[in-house]
């Protein structure tokens, strides 16, 4: 008599059973292990868990992400370490360096995704008569994933940084593909990344990038002048994207406070009083609390509120609430940090909105005789009717509602 217990139904359906949060959870374990055992840098925490599903679903996009990360690293290195010898600026350091990496990653995505890769793909397909959907495969994903990988290279150098990157990706891939997908109810068949409308095409989300860059700049200035620390300038920048749906900001801070409260209780227990909980160990503890909270909340909503979308009640992002809780615990500044983040993110949104509105006036400034209506009609007429289905397929992201948070 045999007992078939697999797959184990661990993750709640409609949320963690098909969410990148689960793969990020695995990736954080992998990075923390090598940090504790081999001293590898504790950086790029979401990278393995974010890229591995792409390796399974769309390997070309994963390759493009790594390629654009390398190009981003070289651009910032060139300006910081080489051109600074003759330029009026000095070497990039700290928050300024990471802000430069974010700016360079946006520039690289614009050039590669909007121009260079489609041109190369079209040439290869026409030259060698291949059947390859280069428009939907030769592009990157993610608002900040390229910047995170490039920043990871900076800490070790490119050649030495490739070894930890590919090792973490390989081990995370094995665990997800042959562990989670075979032994549990986790599946990536419904991921498809169609829910990340802010992350799929850089040309379809200019507002998001303006808000991200402006808020990150404001956060870096506040850190420089007033020593405001948020555990990274991207935390207020990412939260700034959510001011158009404020409930996500509320759920993010609520989750951070719950993690902080439970972590206080756990670390005050006799079991942990004699254990040093710093660095990767503390990160794992706080993120595991966050993940267990998401599992419990997912099952609670699934049982008692089955009609709601579970992920609406999760914090925004993958590690954002965990990183906020860690900084609140370390500095004992929960209320002050909450106020600072809200202040910076709201200021960033206001400045970015003004800047974005000003940028919309540029076309009418250069072409005052061309009305927006005529321009739109001209653009519509430029597409043959036979390409309608092709255009719909390329822009399918705009027709599919979001299912999960980024």
Image: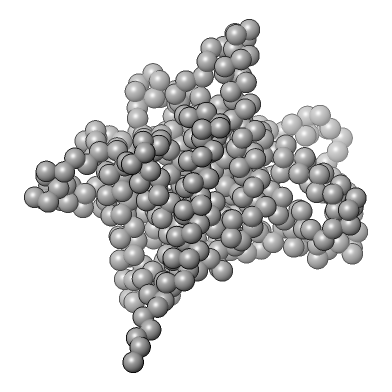
Q: For the N terminus, give its image quadrant.
A: bottom left
Which residue is rendered at x = 33% and y = 76% of the image? 304
Where, by quadrant of the figure, is residue 7 drawn? Answer: bottom left
Camera sees residue 308: no
Is residue 56 or residue 303 the one in the foreground?
Answer: 56
Residue 212 spot, x, y in % from top left: 53, 37
Q: What's the residue at 50%, 64% (across, down)?
A: 177
Q: Position of residue 40 (x, y in %)?
A: 40, 37
Residue 351: x %, y % from top left: 53, 32
Write down the quadrant of residue 110 in the picture: top right
| Most distant residue in the left direction | 270
Residue sitting at 47 percent across and 20 percent down? 93
Q: How many marks?
A: 0
Q: Is residue 135 left or right of 339 when viewed as pictured? A: right
Residue 246 vs residue 364, the one in the foreground = 246
Residue 281 seen in this snapshot? yes
Q: Is residue 60 above or below residue 348?
A: below
- Residue farthest to the bottom? 1
Q: Is residue 97 above or below residue 128?
A: above
- Position of 193 with respect to 46 (left or right) is right
Q: Residue at x 19, y 40 (%)?
A: 276
Q: In this picture, is 333 found above or below 202? A: above
Residue 77 in percent (x, y) is at 58, 23
| Camera-nearest residue between 214 and 263 | 263
Q: Is residue 266 left or right of residue 372?
A: left
Residue closest to the eye, 225 or 85? 85
Judging from the image, the colouring scheme is one colour
């Amino acid at each position: 008599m045999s007992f078939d217990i697999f797959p184990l139904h661990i993750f709640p359906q409609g949320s963690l059973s098909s969410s990148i949060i689960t793969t990020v959870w695995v990736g954080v374990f992998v990075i923390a292990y090598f940090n504790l055992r081999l001293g590898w840098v504790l950086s790029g925490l979401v990278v393995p868990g974010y890229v591995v599903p792409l390796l399974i679903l769309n390997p070309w996009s994963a390759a493009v992400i790594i390629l654009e990360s390398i190009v981003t690293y070289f651009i910032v290195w060139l300006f910081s370490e080489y051109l600074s010898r003759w330029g009026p600026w000095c070497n990039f350091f700290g928050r300024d360096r990471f802000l430069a990496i974010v700016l360079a990653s946006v520039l690289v995505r614009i050039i590669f995704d909007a121009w260079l890769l489609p041109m190369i793909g079209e040439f290869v397909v026409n030259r060698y008569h291949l059947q390859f959907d280069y428009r939907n495969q030769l592009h990157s994903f993610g608002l900040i994933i390229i910047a995170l990988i490039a920043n990871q290279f900076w800490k070790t150098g490119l050649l030495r940084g490739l070894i930890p990157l590919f090792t973490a990706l390989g081990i995370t891939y094995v665990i997800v593909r042959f562990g989670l997908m075979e032994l549990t109810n986790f599946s990536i068949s419904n991921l498809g990344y169609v829910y990340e409308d802010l992350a799929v095409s850089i040309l379809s989300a200019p507002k998001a990038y303006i808000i991200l860059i402006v808020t990150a700049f404001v956060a870096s200035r506040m850190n420089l002048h007033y020593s405001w620390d948020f555990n990274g300038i991207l935390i207020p920048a990412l939260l700034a994207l959510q001011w158009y749906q404020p409930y996500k900001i509320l759920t993010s801070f609520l989750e951070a406070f719950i993690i902080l409260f439970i972590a206080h209780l756990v670390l005050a227990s006799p079991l942990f009083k004699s254990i040093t909980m710093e660095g990767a160990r503390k990160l794992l503890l706080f993120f595991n609390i966050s993940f267990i909270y998401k599992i419990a909340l997912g099952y609670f909503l699934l049982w008692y509120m089955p009609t709601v979308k579970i992920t609406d009640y999760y914090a925004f992002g993958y590690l954002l609430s965990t990183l906020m809780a860690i900084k609140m615990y370390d500095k004992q500044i929960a209320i002050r940090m909450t106020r600072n983040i809200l202040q910076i993110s709201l200021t960033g949104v206001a400045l970015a909105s003004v800047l974005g509105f000003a940028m919309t006036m540029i076309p009418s400034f250069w072409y005052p005789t061309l009305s927006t209506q005529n321009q739109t009609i001209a653009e519509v007429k430029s597409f043959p009717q036979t390409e309608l289905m092709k255009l719909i397929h390329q822009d399918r992201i705009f027709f599919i509602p979001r299912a999960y948070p980024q």
